[in-house]
Amino acid sequence: MATKGTNAKIKELKGIKPEKINDEELKSIQTIISKINQTYIEMGRLEAVKHNQLHTLAGVQDELMIVQDKLKAEYGTDDINIQTGEIKYPENGEVNKKD
């Protein structure tokens, strides 16, 4: 009675090639491909979140520019200590305040 290894050797000698991989090998490949696909899906989700956050950041930066423009119009500078609210005027004391 021929064993599995013997049958494979006989087929190899006759030039007969396997038509399929075994179930264990197939399952292994399917599992790996599934992990790769899930990783790509997660990366896409993260990129979408990143994209939305970049839009949010741009909007907040626009808000800051509006406030800075108001401060320049009111105080002649937008150089403000954000911890204390202290205004730092230019060294030469000249302020471009419009009245």
Image (spheres, rainbow, N blue to C red):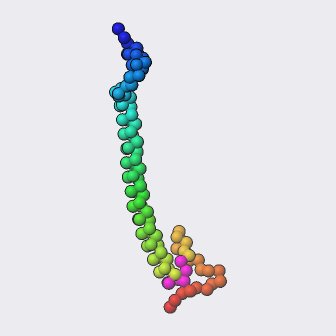
Quarter of the figure with residue 49: bottom left
- Position of 34 compared to 81: left or right? left
Quadrant containing the N terminus in the rendered view: top left
Q: Can residue 47 be seen?
A: yes
Quarter of the figure with residue 28: top left
Image point (38%, 43%), residue name? 37
Q: Is residue 76 magenta?
A: yes
| Residue 75 vertical placement versus 64 (above, below) | below
Residue pushed farthest right?
92
Image point (38%, 52%), residue name? 45
Q: Can residue 8 be seen?
A: no
- Position of 93 compared to 50: left or right? right
| Residue 99 vertical placement versus 19 (above, below) | below
Viewer-side residue, 16 vs 54: 16
Image point (56%, 86%), residue name? 96
Whole-percent x and y of residue 84?
A: 53, 71
Residue pushed farthest front?
14
- Position of 90 compared to 18: left or right? right
Whole-percent x and y of residue 16?
A: 38, 22
Image point (63%, 84%), residue name? 93
Viewer-side residue, 98 vs 86: 98
Q: Which residues are magenta?
A: 73-78
Q: Is residue 19 magenta?
A: no
Whole-percent x and y of residue 87?
A: 56, 77
Viewer-side residue, 60 vs 77: 60
